[in-house]
Image (tube, rainbow, N blue to C red):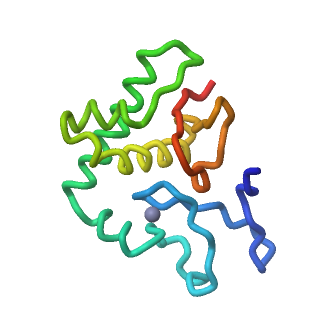
Amino acid sequence: MAEPRHRRARSGAEEPDKTCTVCGRRIEWRRKWARDFDSVKYCSDGCRRRGRSRTAAALDIELAAAIMELLEARATGATICPSEAAQRVGGDDWRELMEPARAAARRLEADGDVIITQRGRRVDPSRATGPIRIGRVR
Ligand SMILES: [Zn+2]
């Protein structure tokens, strides 16, 4: 089951969920970030390193664009596999781009541009393990 998209902060104000700008996974609020949660961008040190790499950032943009192009070329209800985007961008080296392609799909989902499914059902991309499919928002 999907988690609520908002949490209630101690102040009573709603803290919106944040998404890691690299892997697209939800960033859970932590007490140590209480004062500067607005400026938190990455869920981990690994994501911070990747987020600061220009080559990785360029690749991530290409992967997201590839996902949207592939989806637009399909029928409305059709889904694609992240590997299709990885192949489009990476050619023979596409396997290295599988996780980055899944991350691109998660970021797009967080932005409301796509949905992520498993066995035809929408899933929480922060928690989904195993093969996922990417579909258009209807
Ligand atoms: Zn991350």
- Left or right placement of residue 62 versus residue 123 in this view: left
Most extreme residue toward the right is 12
Residue 47: name its quadrant.
bottom left
Q: Is residue 84 above or below residue 11?
A: above
Is 43 in front, or is 86?
A: 86
* Residue farthest along the top direction in this orientation: 75
Q: Relative to 66, is 90 on the left or the right? A: left
Q: Residue at x 33, y 40 (%)?
A: 63
Q: Position of residue 118 (x, y in %)?
A: 61, 37
Q: Nearer the viewer, residue 71 or 118?
A: 118
Q: Position of residue 110 (x, y in %)?
A: 55, 48
Residue drawn at 65 percent across, 43 percent down:
123
For the image, the number of numbered tags is: 0
Q: Residue at x 31, y 47 (%)?
A: 60
Residue under the image location 54 percent in, 46 percent down: 130
Residue 7 horizontal side relative to residue 59, left or right: right
Vertically, is 117 above or below 18?
above
In this rendering, the answer to whether 56 lies above or below 109 is: below
Answer with the quarter of the image where residue 81 lies.
Answer: top left
Q: Quadrant of the C terminus?
A: top right
Ligand 1 resides in the quarter of the picture at bottom left
Percent across and percent down for residue 73 are 41, 16
